[in-house]
Image: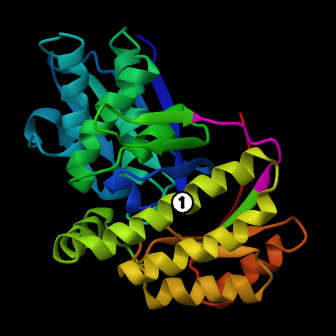
Amino acid sequence: MPAFTSAAPGKIILFGEHAVVYGRPAIAVPVAGVRARAMISADPRAAEGRVRIQAPDINLEADLDKLPGSHPLAAALRAVLSDLGLPRSPACHIRIKSTIPVASGLGSGAAVTVALIRAYSAFLGKPLPDEKVNALAFEIEKLHHGTPSGIDNTVITYAMPVYFQRKPTGPIIETFNVPQPFQIVIGDTGVRSPTAVSVRDVNKGWQAETEYFERLFDQIGSITEDARKMIEAGQPSRLGALMDENQALLVQMGVSSPPLDRLIQAARFAGAFGAKLSGGGRGGNMIALVNGNIAEVVRQALKDAGAVRTLLTPVKSC
């Protein structure tokens, strides 16, 4: 039996983080420069049903049956078996590698899950369609983040720019055209900040000051709608001011941090059109809108301000 491999990109949220959990829209795009990869091969020498998992990036090497049901990797594999109606797996070896920093807002957990679900279902002879991959990945995201919006697994599954909004009747998921590609510089603070923690803290704030947070969410939702119009109109340079407005609201929400603020300010001083945090906040990554002439200047400014790594990624239609 041949080996099966699947890869999935990272992601950044351009607009709408946190507010998206409360029913407002968000825009996210894939980041092809970082990827998670799952490689699965049959192990004919092992006992039937033995699944060996190696994930050196998180120092994991274990058999599937030794991992608790709450472990995201184990939960993803068991979800695939259940969905396919299979009582057990053929003996196999699974190796997972990722260049996506953990807890940095780039969707590392969702990317690993999507890559793993695709590779495993293909190994079992029944590749799952995107809709099912996305649905299963969303369930695993709940283990990572508690109350996820669903945007990470969606943009990573479809690997396209996505407009996303949760509704009581079901999520709105729309890929959309980017007639004028543009460039984003990503700056990593090097500070790990699990999304579940900041999502939980925002929820505590929302419960304590519901009207105040609802106003913040409404403003972010309006900014996100305007951003989509600018992108589809081929006017990406106008996104900078919207990014700055979105960041100011995230600061009021309490999810920025001194390292993020320092990088955002450095990007603006270096000539970026606008900048903001991306993802859960408190650490992780910030993003800056740039053109080709200043991209390297902004990257150097971010490094000088303490970024542990930078990445330039295009935003465009597939």
Q: Residues within 10 Å of mark 1 (few under 14, many from 20)?
A: some
Q: Residue at x 38, y 62 (%)?
A: 18
Q: Amino acid at mark 1?
A: Ser
> Picture coordinates of residue 155 (x, y %)?
51, 41
Whether residue 34 is situated above or below residue 271 in the rendered picture = above
Check the picture and name the quadrant holding the N terminus. top left
> Picture coordinates of residue 221 (x, y %)?
49, 58
Q: Which residues are magenta?
A: 175-182
Of residues 98 and 59, which is closer to you in this image?
98
Mark 1 element type: helix
Residue at mark 1: 222
> Picture coordinates of residue 64 (x, y %)?
16, 34
Q: Is residue 311 left or right of residue 59?
A: right
> Picture coordinates of residue 140 (x, y %)?
26, 40
Q: Residue at x 20, y 37 (%)?
A: 74
Q: Residue at x 38, y 30 (%)?
A: 134
